[in-house]
Amino acid sequence: MKQYVIIGNGIAAAGCIEGIRSADPDGAITVVWRRNIPFTAAR
């Protein structure tokens, strides 16, 4: 099983995660970001 690290949690990160999931459904994905606010949160 491969392991992936995504830096940031914006729209680009979401696209990366979707792409990884479609190519490698069993891979482990870790998302690292500075804020604890998801990109879908209203501001």
Image (cartoon, rainbow, N blue to C red):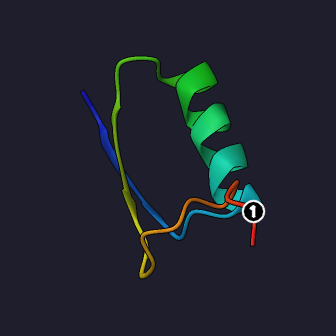
**Mark 1 belongs to which amino acid?**
Ala
Which residue is more in the foreground, 11 or 36?
Answer: 36
At 73% across and 60% down in the image, what residue appears? Answer: 12
Residue 24 position, x and y percent, is 48, 23
Q: Residues within 10 Å of mark 1 (few under 14, many from 20)?
A: few
- For residue 22, what is the image quadrant? top right
Q: Residue furthest bottom?
A: 34
Which residue is more in the foreground, 17 or 37?
Answer: 37
Viewport quadrant of the C terminus: bottom right
Q: Is residue 15 left or right of residue 20?
A: right
Q: Residue furthest front?
A: 43
Return the residue at label 1.
Answer: 42
Q: Residue furthest left?
A: 1
Residue 30 position, x and y percent, is 33, 51
At 46% across and 17% down in the image, what residue appears? Answer: 25
At 66% across and 48% down in the image, what residue appears? Answer: 14
Viewport quadrant of the N terminus: top left
Query: Of helix, strand and loop, which one carries label 1?
Result: loop
Figure disc tally: 1
At 72% across and 46% down in the image, what residue appears? Answer: 15
- For residue 41, what is the image quadrant? bottom right
User: Height in image: 3 above or below 20?
Assistant: below
Q: Is residue 28 left or right of residue 14?
A: left
